[in-house]
């Protein structure tokens, strides 16, 4: 690759050189970026374009639901969605009257608002810029993104065609892929629900139908909540490798505990030792263990980036599952539901894996090799819900526009299979190993570079950093020409 940086002529006062930014995806990440650009840049009409097929911006897959039984997993005061105004969402909940309409939101340790309310909050944040025209919402899915005459050309699935100087990929979570055995045995069978997240996905399940959920994380518990809210009362079994359910949030207010940034651990083992030590400290002090995992989350990006690649791999192989079980915690409302359902014997969890599937006339019969001894038990259910979470390994393959860009050498998977490769400035890393100056990767897709980049506060902070870079390019006093051989 050859890069030539040329100064602009002296008599040219810095004026916007790159004007249009196209953001692909209008969930929380894309909407945050668009809003921050509009707030900070001197953008004209149509200079910030967001491709998003959903009607509103800001909700995305995570919050774009109308189902009132789906709540945030994190208390409102910890959402910190707006840089510079961390309590904006809490204030909005009161001022908008949403809290009065939803008194059940108040749980032990904070307000666990409805996801739909968070989406409404985000939509309100972006609305003034849509009204003014500085942000344009193209209600289409981006199908093709390519280079044309030094700019980007983005084509939507319903005919839109937009040229831009910068592209930010914020397409969020890829769809889940059910385990092979399930898709091979039940492909095309409506009794396999391969993604419980879209609205209405569980609609056909009758109140007395037995359900087997494959997966036991927060998505699986969401499915249980949605089923019970619609009057489902039959047995639900959650099947996972460990049989463990997510941990509950701690009650009361507490500060994160543990400083992992002094002499940042540079091996997975030393990280584990430091975490164990911090856990002993909080146990002695009578503080909740959650405080240690909150500290790990806050410092997660610096910890991750200090680890060499081989140690990052070890963390993923040996510590990830345990970390995630403590990091992604259930809201008090879901914790209560789980307790109630278990006590009534209507919710069970099992450790094991499916080894055979037989679609019968009424029920689907599965053989499960149970843990720890591998004893095979037979289980019959009317429905199987795959709640194994987004398939980040297949993020590029799941989108034609991303697959095209990979084909042209402009994108590649990150080395851990967590999303798309980017550098520490969030710039996509091309096939030749060099960053693409005007192509950014935002949100959970960039986790390979940052480690902890799933929750709202971390995404909002990354969006702010990307916006600073885009603005620096906009008012640049030099021009860089990149010649690649891809
Ligand atoms: C169910 C769920 C609940 C969560 N709850 C919490 C929580 O309580 N607290 C918290 O901090 N974090 C939570 N998270 C984490 C969540 O990842 C982030 O908070 C954040 O919402 C991610 O936003 P996103 O915009 O990157 O992704 P998404 O929410 O996945 O949105 C991506 C958007 O991009 C659009 N898109 C995709 N491809 C294209 C294309 N080719 N063209 C145009 N548009 C496209 C999609 O339509 C979608 O609207 C939750 C995640 C999920 C999945």
Image (tube, grey):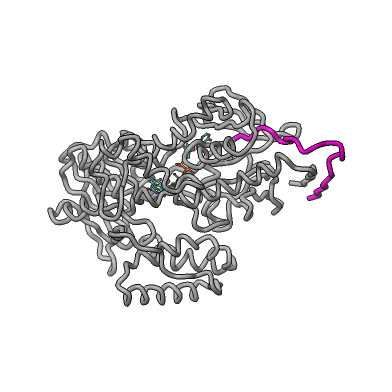
Count of numbered badges drawn on the protein: 0
Decide if residue 393 is on the left or right side of residue 422: left
Residue range in magenta is 1-22
Q: Which residue sits at x=25%, y=65%?
A: 375
Decide if residue 420 is on the left or right side of residue 66: right
Q: Which residue sits at x=67%, y=49%?
A: 430
x and y, in percent, of residue 322 in the image: 38, 65
In terms of secondary structure, what is the magenta stretch mainly? Answer: loop
Against 323, residue 121 (above or below) is above
x and y, in percent, of residue 7 in the image: 84, 44
x and y, in percent, of residue 75 in the image: 34, 51
Q: Residue furthest right?
A: 10
Is 17 one of the magenta-colored residues? yes
> Closer to the camera, 140 or 396?
140
Is 431 one of the magenta-colored residues? no
Visible in this render: residue 334? Answer: no
**Quarter of the rendering containing residue 41:** top right
**Quarter of the rendering containing residue 397:** top right
Against 46, residue 464 (above or below) is below
Visible in this render: residue 185? Answer: yes
Q: Which residue sits at x=27%, y=63%?
A: 370
> Closer to the camera, 336 or 162?
336
> Closer to the camera, 348 or 123?
123
x and y, in percent, of residue 57 in the image: 47, 33
Query: Can you tell me which quadrant of the image ligand 1 is in?
Result: top left
Decide if residue 466 is on the left or right side of residue 5: left
């Amino acid at each position: 690759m050859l890069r030539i940086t040329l100064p602009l002529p002296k008599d040219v006062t810095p004026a916007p050189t790159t004007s249009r930014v196209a953001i692909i995806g209008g969930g929380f990440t894309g909407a945050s970026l668009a809003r921050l650009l509009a707030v900070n840049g001197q953008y004209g009409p149509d200079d910030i374009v967001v491709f998003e097929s959903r009607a509103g911006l800001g909700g995305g897959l995570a919050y774009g639901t109308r189902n009132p039984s789906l709540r945030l997993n994190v208390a409102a005061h910890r959402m910190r969605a707006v840089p510079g105004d961390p309590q904006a969402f809490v204030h909005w909940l009161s001022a908008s009257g949403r809290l009065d309409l939803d008194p059940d939101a108040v749980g032990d340790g904070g307000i666990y608002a409805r996801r739909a309310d968070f989406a409404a909050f985000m939509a309100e944040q972006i609305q003034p810029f849509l009204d003014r025209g500085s942000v344009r919402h193209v209600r289409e899915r981006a199908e093709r993104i390519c280079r044309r005459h030094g700019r980007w050309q983005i084509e939507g699935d319903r005919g839109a065609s937009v040229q831009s100087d910068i592209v930010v990929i914020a397409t969020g979570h890829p769809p889940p892929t059910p385990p092979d055995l399930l898709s091979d045995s039940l492909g095309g069978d409506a009794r396999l629900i391969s993604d419980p997240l879209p609205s209405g996905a569980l609609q056909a399940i009758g109140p007395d139908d037995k359900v087997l959920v494959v997966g036991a994380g927060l998505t699986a518990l969401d499915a249980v909540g949605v089923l019970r809210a619609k009057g489902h009362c039959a047995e639900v079994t959650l099947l996972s490798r460990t049989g463990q359910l997510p941990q509950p949030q701690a009650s009361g207010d507490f500060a994160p505990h543990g400083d992992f940034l002094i002499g940042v651990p540079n091996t997975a083992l030393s990280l584990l030792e430091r975490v164990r030590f911090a856990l002993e400290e909080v146990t002695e002090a009578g503080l909740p263990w959650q405080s240690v995992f909150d500290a790990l989350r806050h410092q997660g990006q610096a910890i991750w980036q200090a680890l060499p690649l081989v140690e990052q791999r070890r963390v993923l192989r040996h510590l990830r599952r345990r970390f995630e079980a403590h990091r992604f915690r259930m809201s008090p409302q879901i914790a209560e539901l789980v307790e109630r359902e278990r006590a009534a014997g209507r919710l069970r969890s099992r450790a094991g894996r499916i080894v055979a599937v037989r679609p019968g006339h009424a029920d689907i019969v599965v053989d499960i090799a149970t843990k720890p001894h591998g004893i095979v038990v037979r289980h019959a259910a009317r429905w199987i819900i795959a709640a194994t979470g987004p398939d980040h390994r297949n993020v590029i393959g799941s989108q034609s526009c991303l697959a095209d860009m990979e084909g042209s050498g402009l994108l590649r998977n990150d080395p851990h299979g967590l999303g798309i490769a980017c550098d520490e400035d969030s710039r996509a890393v091309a096939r030749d190993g060099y960053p693409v100056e005007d192509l950014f990767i935002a949100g959970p897709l960039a986790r390979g570079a940052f480690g902890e980049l799933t929750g709202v506060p971390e995404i909002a902070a990354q969006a702010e950093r990307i916006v600073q870079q885009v603005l620096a390019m906009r008012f640049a006093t030099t021009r860089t020409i990149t010649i690649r051989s891809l």
